[in-house]
């Protein structure tokens, strides 16, 4: 080997050593970058899972609230049917029914009725009964439970009857 060739070979090995050291430092930087990227992606993934879970839970509660509303509405409609009694041929003015509990598709529905009677001094005498019906539907666990839903509907219904002799006819 000639002298010039030997100097070039030494120069190359020093350059290779410097390159290897720089490469090692770059690999260390790459490792730090990769760890940072993994931590950032894991945090982003956890945030997405949290938002998705919250959205799912809220959607389920909205659905249960809607079901509770319709159960309460069914209870009120049952109560209106009881006091209006379209099948009654004598058109009498019924008294309120007692508090009633109905079980509808996982919801406990409590229906109550109160009434007030008013009389108009006309010929014939008109009797007007105003019924206040309240239906409360609840389900999904005990009060205070995260899954508990409750909806209440209150309606006023009036029925008028005119007393003509021994019978009551519609006003």
Image: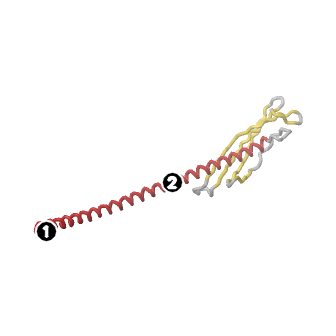
Quarter of the image for the N terminus: give it: bottom left
Dot label at residue 52: 2
Look at the numbered discs 1 and 2 and tell me whether their residues touch, using CB distance below 8 Å. no
User: Please, is residue 154 above or below residue 20 in the view?
Assistant: above
Color scheme of the displayed model = secondary structure
Residue located farthest toward the right when viewing the structure as drawn: 166
Q: Could you classify mark 2 by the number of other residues whose Cα lies within 10 Å: few (under 14), some (14-19), or many (20 or more)? A: few
Q: Residue at x 77, y 38 (%)?
A: 129
Element type where label 1 sits in the image:
helix
Residue located farthest toward the left when viewing the structure as drawn: 3
Q: Residue at x 73, y 52 (%)?
A: 102
The residue lying toward the viewer, choosing from 27 and 115, is 27
In three-dimensional space, the C-alpha distance between marks 1 and 2, rounded to whole angstroms, equals: 67 Å
Residue 133 coordinates in the image, percent (x, y): 71, 44
Residue located farthest toward the top when viewing the structure as drawn: 123
The residue lying toward the viewer, choosing from 141 and 115, is 141
Image-based side of 81 in relation to 56, left or right: right
Residue 24 coordinates in the image, percent (x, y): 26, 65
**Picture quadrant of residue 29:** bottom left
Q: Residue at x 69, y 51 (%)?
A: 109
Element type where label 2 sits in the image:
helix
Residue located farthest toward the front when viewing the structure as drawn: 1
Image-based side of 18 in relation to 98, left or right: left
Residue 114 coordinates in the image, percent (x, y): 73, 44
Q: Residue at x 71, y 42 (%)?
A: 132
Q: How many marks?
A: 2
Read off the residue under disc 1.
6
Q: Could you classify mark 1 by the number of other residues whose Cα lies within 10 Å: few (under 14), some (14-19), or many (20 or more)? A: few
């Amino acid at each position: 080997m000639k002298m010039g060739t030997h100097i070039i070979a030494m120069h190359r090995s020093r350059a290779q050593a410097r390159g290897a050291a720089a490469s090692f430092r770059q690999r260390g930087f790459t490792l730090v970058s990769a760890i940072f990227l993994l931590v950032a992606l894991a945090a982003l993934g956890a945030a997405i899972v949290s938002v998705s879970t919250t959205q799912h839970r809220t959607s389920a509660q909205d659905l249960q609230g809607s079901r509770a509303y319709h159960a309460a509405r069914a209870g009120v409609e049952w109560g209106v049917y009881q006091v209006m009694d379209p099948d009654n041929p004598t058109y009498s003015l019924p008294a309120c029914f007692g508090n009633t509990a109905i079980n509808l598709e996982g919801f406990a529905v409590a229906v109550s009725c109160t009434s007030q009677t008013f009389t108009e001094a006309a010929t014939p005498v008109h009797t007007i009964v105003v019924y206040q019906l309240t239906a409360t539907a609840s389900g999904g666990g005990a009060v205070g439970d995260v899954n508990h839903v409750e909806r209440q509907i209150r309606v006023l219904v009036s029925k008028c009857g005119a007393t003509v002799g021994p019978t009551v006819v519609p006003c």
